[in-house]
């Protein structure tokens, strides 16, 4: 076995013994089990003040198919057909059934999994799906489910809903917005319009929030700036800490316009000017470009990050709601530059995030819509 | 990730840069013939900031007259013309004739390779440099691209690797940052005029501050499959000094479809 994974497996076991840092710290629900107050974390500080949180971070529960049960491996939040599961019960979906009469997958939603969902299985200690596959190929996999591996069928699993503060742990869409989401959802596999192709499938930037659910992120801290440089595609984001005013809100950006400040070990970020074109999941979840995020990067320990983003967008949602994802330090991410040998501070410092060109490598025609030109006629005519 | 413990001086240096770059120049002019350049706590020239090319390199590295699409510009090639091998010259001419349908930057929004990323569409880019850092990070407005210019003495990884932006290892020669890049994939275009390269491309960039607000950018381009001998680009990069100027985004691969989202 690769020693890297041994190390990480031990780290995870320790984490579990201490109450599963990612989850327990995130307990926003009153139903969460009580736990003794954790010792406050005393971070190493950079000389200009803020805690040193640099390094590579990866999701505890990886997945962008369905926000209410993120690890089920598909866009389907519940297994259709059938009754919606009761709140608080397992909600693992499988591949969607396509209605043979319509050729469409039904756009069904379920109750979201609560933060206290039982039998949740975190991703491999190395990170998300790609890391699990790499671990299997490397002959590791102590942290893999029996039978799991690069070629094993993906088993439905459970994880807490990404939505943490609505009664059913789902997005509080207005009726009109829900109809739009359901329409996109129903066309995920049977696309008929340009807009049916999921933004990630086009290798687009996924926005300040969703990008967190796609591979890893490397954080760099520079005086006046926090940089987030993502794995999985060439994407980055700059958070400005220098109190400059926001850009005009008519000017929209793929990652929005972010102004941050530190409150202890929490980086609070106000993000406007989101173009929202990256959407929020493969299931058609979305905001409008009026959405305003208040983000909190809660560094809860040397290796744990709780990320929460409050969505405020009355044109789409009936009330503000909060997206959350737990992250952990990743010692292995990206497609290359993996340090060999045991994981130490030194070996981790040798990790290099290598180029991951994405749209350049798309299969020609892979995103074509049947019956429509590859390049929209009105664009080509310009 | 290597973390520096001496960053407040960086902050001071940065503040100086933003607040009184002109003051620095004035002060230095009285004390020395060479303009003072900003420096980090480790004594290295401080490249932090937003930079931008303004010339015609992206249209054509060599002399070109104005047309309906772009202004004319003088060559930035030190040898005046690019010393092509005969077959490569033919390919370049074919590319030129079909440039509006073949340029991978203007037609596909591909990552532009090095050095074109520096002047592609003349878009700004931001350099992030820490004292005693293990690398210099460069974020480009073009297509969310980034480069890491490693300064920690590491060698190129075992290759060959097919990358758009190559693998960049750097060292300081006095006040000049020398960036050595290999591991490029085939068929990159150095400009919109069809100047092209092979996987043997070897690029050596030299970044040197002329004063607080001007970077001299010299590039040696070697590719024995394409050129008869190494040749050189020299152009100036300018600091963006507008108040609250910041990088925006230029996600050109989304242009045809983005109106249909969210």
Image: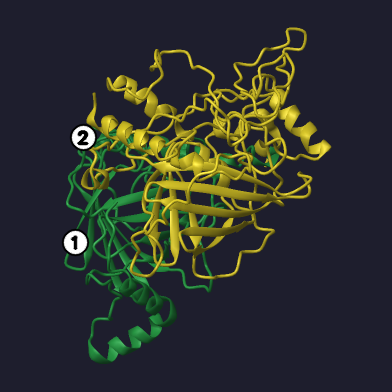
Chain colours: A yellow, B green
Q: Chain of mark 2?
A: A
The quarter holding residue B94 reads: top left
| Residue A102 relative to residue A133: left or right | right
Residue occupying image coordinates x 53% and y 22%: A157
Residue B224 location in percent, x, y?
Answer: 20, 38
Residue occupying image coordinates x 67% and y 12%: A97
Residue occupying image coordinates x 67% and y 38%: A379
The quarter holding residue A112 reads: top right
Quadrant including the C terminus of chain A: top right
| Residue B171 relative to residue A49: left or right | left
| Residue A134 relative to residue B245: left or right | left
Q: Which mark is residue A340?
A: 2
How crowded pointer 2 is (Cα within 10 Å; few <14, some 14-19, many 20+) is rated as few
Is label 1 in a helix, a strand or a loop? strand
Is label 2 in a helix, a strand or a loop? loop
| Residue A320 relative to residue A39: left or right | right
Q: Is residue B113 visible?
A: yes
> Which residue is more in the foreground, A270 or B17?
A270
A353 is higher (above) or lower (below) than A94: below
Marks 2 and 1: which is nearer the front? 2
Q: Which mark is residue A200?
A: none
Q: Chain of mark 1?
A: B
Q: Which residue lies under the disc numbered 1?
A: B172
Residue A151 location in percent, x, y?
Answer: 40, 13
The quarter holding residue A283 reads: top right
Residue furthest bottom in the image = B30
> Which residue is more in the foreground, A167 or B20?
A167
A89 is higher (above) or lower (below) than A12: above
A364 is higher (above) or lower (below) than B154: above
Residue A93 location in percent, x, y?
Answer: 61, 20
């Amino acid at each position: 076995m690769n020693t890297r994974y041994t190390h990480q497996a031990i780290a995870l076991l320790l984490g579990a013994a201490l109450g599963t840092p990612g989850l327990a710290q995130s307990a926003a629900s009153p139903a969460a089990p009580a736990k003794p107050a954790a010792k406050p974390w005393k971070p190493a500080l950079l000389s200009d003040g803020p805690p040193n949180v640099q390094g590579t971070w990866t999701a505890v529960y990886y997945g962008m198919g369905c926000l209410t049960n993120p690890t089920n491996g598909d866009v389907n939040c519940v297994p259709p057909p059938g009754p919606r599961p009761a709140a608080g019960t397992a909600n693992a979906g499988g591949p969607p059934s396509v209605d043979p009469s319509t050729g469409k997958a039904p756009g069904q939603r379920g109750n979201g999994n609560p933060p206290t969902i039982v039998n949740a299985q975190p991703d491999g200690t190395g990170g998300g799906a790609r890391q699990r596959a790499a671990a299997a190929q490397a002959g590791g996999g102590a942290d893999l489910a029996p039978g799991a591996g690069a070629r094993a069928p993906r088993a439905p699993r459970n994880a807490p809903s990404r939505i943490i503060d609505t009664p059913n742990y789902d997005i509080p869409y207005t009726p009109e917005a829900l109809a739009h989401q359901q329409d996109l959802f129903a066309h995920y596999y049977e696309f008929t319009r340009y807009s049916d192709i999921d933004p990630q499938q086009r290798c687009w930037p996924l926005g300040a929030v969703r990008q967190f659910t796609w591979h890893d992120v490397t954080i760099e801290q520079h005086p006046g700036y926090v940089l987030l440089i993502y794995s999985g595609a060439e994407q980055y984001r700059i958070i400005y800490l220098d109190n400059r005013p926001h850009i005009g809100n008519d000017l929209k950006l793929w990652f929005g316009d972010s102004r941050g400040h530190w409150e202890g070990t929490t980086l609070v970020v106000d993000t406007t000017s989101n173009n929202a074109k990256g959407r929020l999941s493969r299931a058609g979840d979305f905001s409008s470009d009026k959405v305003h995020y208040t983000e909190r990067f809660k560094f809860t320990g040397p290796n744990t990050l709780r990320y929460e983003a409050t969505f405020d967008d009355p044109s789409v949602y009936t009330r503000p709601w909060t997206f959350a994802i737990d992250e952990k330090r990743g010692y292995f991410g990206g497609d290359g530059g993996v340090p060999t040998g045991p994981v130490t501070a030194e070996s981790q410092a040798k990790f290099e995030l290598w180029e991951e060109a994405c749209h350049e490598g798309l299969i020609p025609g892979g995103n074509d819509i049947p019956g429509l030109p590859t390049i929209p006629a009105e664009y080509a005519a310009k | 990730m290597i973390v520096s413990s001496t960053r407040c001086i960086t902050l001071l240096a940065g503040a100086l840069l933003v607040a009184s770059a002109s003051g620095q120049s004035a002060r230095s002019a009285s004390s020395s013939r060479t303009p003072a350049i900003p420096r980090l706590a480790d004594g290295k020239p401080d490249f932090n900031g937003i930079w931008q090319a303004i010339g015609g390199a992206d249209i054509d590295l060599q002399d070109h007259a104005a047309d309906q699409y772009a202004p004319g510009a003088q060559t930035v090639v030190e040898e005046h013309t690019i010393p092509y091998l005969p077959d490569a010259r033919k390919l370049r001419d074919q590319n030129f004739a079909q440039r509006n349908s073949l340029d991978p930057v203007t037609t596909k929004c591909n990552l532009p390779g090095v050095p074109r990323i520096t002047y592609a569409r003349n878009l700004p880019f931001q350099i992030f440099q820490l004292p005693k850092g293990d690398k210099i990070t460069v974020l480009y407005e073009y297509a969310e691209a980034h480069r890491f210019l490693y300064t920690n003495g590491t060698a190129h990884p075992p290759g060959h690797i097919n990358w758009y932006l190559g693998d960049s290892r750097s060292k300081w020669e006095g006040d000049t940052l020398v960036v050595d890049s290999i591991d490029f994939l085939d068929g990159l275009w150095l400009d919109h005029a069809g100047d092209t390269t092979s996987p043997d491309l070897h690029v050596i960039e030299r970044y040197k501050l002329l004063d607080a607000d001007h970077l001299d950018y010299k590039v040696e381009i070697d590719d024995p499959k394409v050129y008869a001998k190494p040749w050189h680009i020299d152009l100036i990069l300018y600091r963006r000094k507008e108040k609250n100027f910041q990088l925006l985004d230029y996600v050109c691969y989304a242009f045809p479809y983005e109106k249909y989202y969210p």
